[in-house]
Image (cartoon, rainbow, N blue to C red):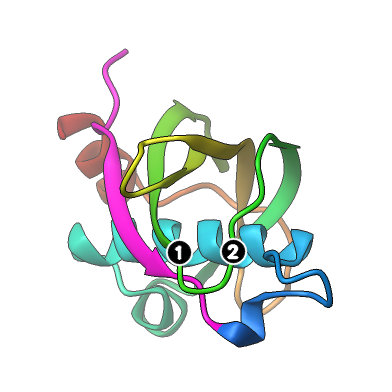
Amino acid sequence: MSFVGEFHWPIRVYYEDTDAGGVVYYANYLKFMERARSEMLRQRGWELDRLAQEEGILFAVSRVTIEYRQPARFNDALIVSSQITRLARASIDFQQAIYRSQSGELLCEGQVRVACVSAAQFKPCPIPKHIREAILER
């Protein structure tokens, strides 16, 4: 099965992203990954708020595995890569990585599973057929 190619999203580290040691606080890498996934979907025409309103679905993170390799610091320019690696009936798996823009150094990488859930009931539901087909086409 062929999936969507790798998507890249630039991010700058702001002072608010860092901890007392001057490095990016560990949970903020997850925020960076979230932004990149959202932008990847937006680029393909799927606004998350519209999916909730028009399709009655939300995507909720159900699993995350992350490995930290090197710290990012204040004012670093980063690139977050995202790629869909698995499309199931009611979930999507993403492989994501964060690199330092200048050197290409890998800072962290992770796997994220998002589950499709009903916006009204917050229970798992199938990904709409036209969205699944659009993912498989790209």
Identify the residue under disc 1: 76
Q: Secondary structure at mark 2?
A: loop
Residue marked by disc 2 = 73
Task: Please indicate, yes or no, whether residue 95 appears anywhere in the rendered image.
Answer: no
**Residue in view at x 53 percent, y 63 percent:** 32
Badge 1: how crowded within 10 Å, few (<14), some, or many (20+)? some
Residue 33 point in image, percent of width and height: 53, 56
Q: Residue at x 64, y 77 (%)?
A: 17
Tell which of 42 and 103 is nearer to you: 103
Residue sitting nearer the eye, 125 or 48: 48
Tag 2: amino acid: Arg
Instruction: Specify whether 22 is left or right of 11.
Output: right
Dot 2, how many residues are within 10 Å of its Cα: few (below 14), some (14-19), or many (20+)? many
Q: Which mark is residue 26?
A: none
As drawn, 89 above or below 134: above
Decide whether residue 116 is among the magenta residues: no
Are dots 2 and 1 in contact, CB under 8 Å? Answer: yes
**Percent position (x, y) of residue 52?**
47, 78
Give above or below for 69 relative to 22: above
Residue type (three-letter) at the residue carrying disc 1:
Asp
Q: Quadrant of residue 7?
A: top left
Q: Which corner quadrant holds the C terminus?
A: top left
- Camera-side residue: 109 or 16? 16
Residue 69 locus on image (x, y percent): 68, 34
The outermost residue toward the top is: 1
Q: Which region is colored magenta? A: 1-14
